[in-house]
Image (cartoon, helix red, strand yellow):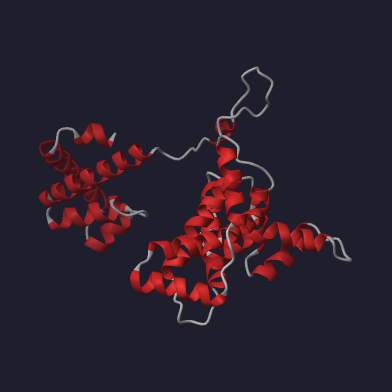
Amino acid sequence: MRDKAKRAMIRAAMKAPYLDRGEEHELALRWKEHRDQDAMHRITTAHMRLVISMAMKFRYFGLSMGDLIQEGHVGLLEAAARFEPERDVRFSTYATWWIRASMQDYILRNWSIVRGGTSSAQKALFFNLRRLRARLAQGPETMSGSALYKEISDALGVSEADVAMMDSRLSGPDTSLNAPLVDDGGGSADRMDFLVSDAPLPDEIVGETIDVERRSGWLKNALGVLNEREMRIIAERRLQDDGATLEALGETLGISKERVRQIESRALEKLKSALVKESPAFLSSAA
């Protein structure tokens, strides 16, 4: 039924009468100044063959011709709504850009489940890579690999890496990560099995961040129980990557290294008591 409707639409488009320049201008004025729906309909109907012709150029991307024509018709209506008849330009010239843009956007959205061609350079690469490859293959020197990618990258103004990536995408259809590596019916490993990440899960990262912030807050509050000398010894011995030695601290403070050890031991006991009082769960969470 769908194919029958498509054929009927194509036949109707081919039978639609052409518009001469004067008639086209008059219809465009009627639409712009009076929003005459009949004028809009006659303009778009007369140019549906342009939509069909352009859809034929994109048929090699494997999408339905009917869908391409429908998207092109959307572009045609947009062009008709925006056309300014006072400019000395034929409607077909103006509408071509809108029709092509509408079809290309549809192809980029539906050709693959992976979104691509988001920039103008990427779009140019997507729609011109096959054509450039075919043209270069017919040249006097056969190119392949990096030489071919460099020639295409220079022609389209994109990097060789982008050319290589797009070439690999266009060389085959999308493949499911749940598809088996070997189609032997024996339950072989899926592609997903080889994409396992060793990185922590998001909930683990969040949980660790919260725990670190909580323990840091407990420690900061507990350090308030230390006097100035105890705080200095703990800071230089325990809170630095390269902790000071007992001997070096003793020389700085003018006391023996044994005295430094005693002060440090007493300070650690005070910290432990303060932390347990602050939160009994601290020791277990720190462990």
Q: Position of residue 283 (x, y in %)?
A: 22, 34
Q: Position of residue 191 (x, y in %)?
A: 59, 32
Q: Residue at x 69, y 70 (%)?
A: 155
Q: Position of residue 163 (x, y in %)?
A: 66, 59
Is residue 162 visible in the rendered image? The answer is no
User: Quadrant location of residue 38?
Assistant: bottom left
Q: How many marks?
A: 0
Q: Residue at x 46, y 66 (%)?
A: 80
Q: Position of residue 33 (x, y in %)?
A: 35, 74
Name the image quarter holding the C terminus.
Answer: top left
User: Quadrant location of residue 271?
Assistant: top left
Q: Residue at x 54, y 78 (%)?
A: 89
Left or right: 37, with 233 as reference point? right
- Is 275 situated above or below 74? above
Q: Residue at x 53, y 71 (%)?
A: 91
Instruction: Give the camera-side residue of 35 and 2.
Output: 35
Left or right: 108, with 147 as reference point? left
Instruction: Give the camera-side residue of 137 and 210.
Output: 137
Is residue 180 visible in the rendered image? The answer is yes
Residue at the top extreme, as displayed: 186
Instruction: Give the camera-side residue of 204 and 27.
Output: 27
Residue at the right extreme, as displayed: 140
Left or right: 71, with 287 as reference point? right
Name the image quarter holding the N terminus.
Answer: top right
- Is 210 situated above or below 72? above
Instruction: Give the camera-side residue of 209 and 162.
Output: 162
User: Quadrant location of residue 195?
Assistant: top right
